[in-house]
Image: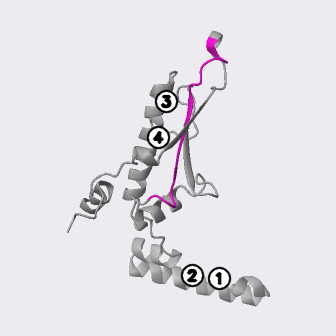
Amino acid sequence: MLAGIRWYQLVAIRGLATKVPVGHIKINTSRSSGPGGQSVNKSETKVQARFNVEVASWMTDATKEKFRTLYKNRITQTGDFIVECDGKNGDSTFTDGVPDFASQEQNRKACIEKLNEAVQKAEQYEEQVHMSFLEQIQQQKTSKEIEQYNKKRRENKRKLKRLGHKTLADF
């Protein structure tokens, strides 16, 4: 029964933390910005890691939808999710407590860790249900307080009508 299922699909089925398969990550390196001393224009320590959310067969459809909702401003038009580690400690485009390092290998590991954290955060993400104003009042107030509030509103409406404020009386 499980013969046709890949390992990352099995991880998603069992509810374990999903990690981005290394084969799906595209890694680019470039020279880091900012001060760097003698090696500023020689070493490529900045690492940019990306994976395409749209073709990620290892993610469930529900996780993809949560991921798109949570990171809608970080996904490109082609569907790529991008993180960078720049070599400047703490100054990256996507910081979740993972520091940036001065070496390319450390930045590569940090980028992969950031990608995995983003996927895990999307798996655990639950959209908050927003209550209407009336529901909030009913949840926080007693029935007597609600009745007093409604009575006060009716009186204010009546007064405003008497004064000729038609627009304010219509609420």
> How far apart are the two marked residues, 4 and 3, measured between alpha carbons?
14 Å
Provide the secondary structure element on which disc 2 rests. helix
Q: Nearer the viewer, residue 49 or 83?
A: 49
Mark 1: amino acid: Asn
Q: Which residue is mark 4?
A: 96
Residue 19 location (% of width, % of height): 36, 48
Spot the residue most to the left: 1
From the viewer's perspective, is the residue at label 3 or at label 1 nearer? 3
Write down the region rendered in magenta: 39-56
* Residue at point 65%, 82% (across, down): 156
Cβ–Cβ under 8 Å for marks 4 and 1: no
Closer to the chain start, of discs 3 and 1, is 3
Closer to the chain start, of discs 4 and 3, is 4
Cβ–Cβ under 8 Å for marks 4 and 3: no
Q: Nearer the viewer, residue 97 or 129?
A: 97
Closer to the chain start, of discs 4 and 1, is 4
Q: Residues within 10 Å of mark 3 (few under 14, many from 20)?
A: many
Q: Which mark is residue 107?
A: 3
Spot the residue most to the front: 3
> How far apart are the two marked residues, 2 and 4, measured between alpha carbons?
48 Å
Q: Which residue is mark 2?
A: 152
Provide the secondary structure element on which disc 4 rests. loop
Mark 2: amino acid: Lys
From the viewer's perspective, is the residue at label 2 or at label 4 nearer? 4
Query: Would you say 9 lies left or right of 100 here?
Result: left
Q: How is the image coloured?
A: one colour
Provide the secondary structure element on which disc 1 rests. helix
Q: Residues within 10 Å of mark 2 (few under 14, many from 20)?
A: few
From the viewer's perspective, is the residue at label 4 or at label 3 nearer? 3
Closer to the chain start, of discs 3 and 2, is 3
In this view, 106 is above or below 1: above
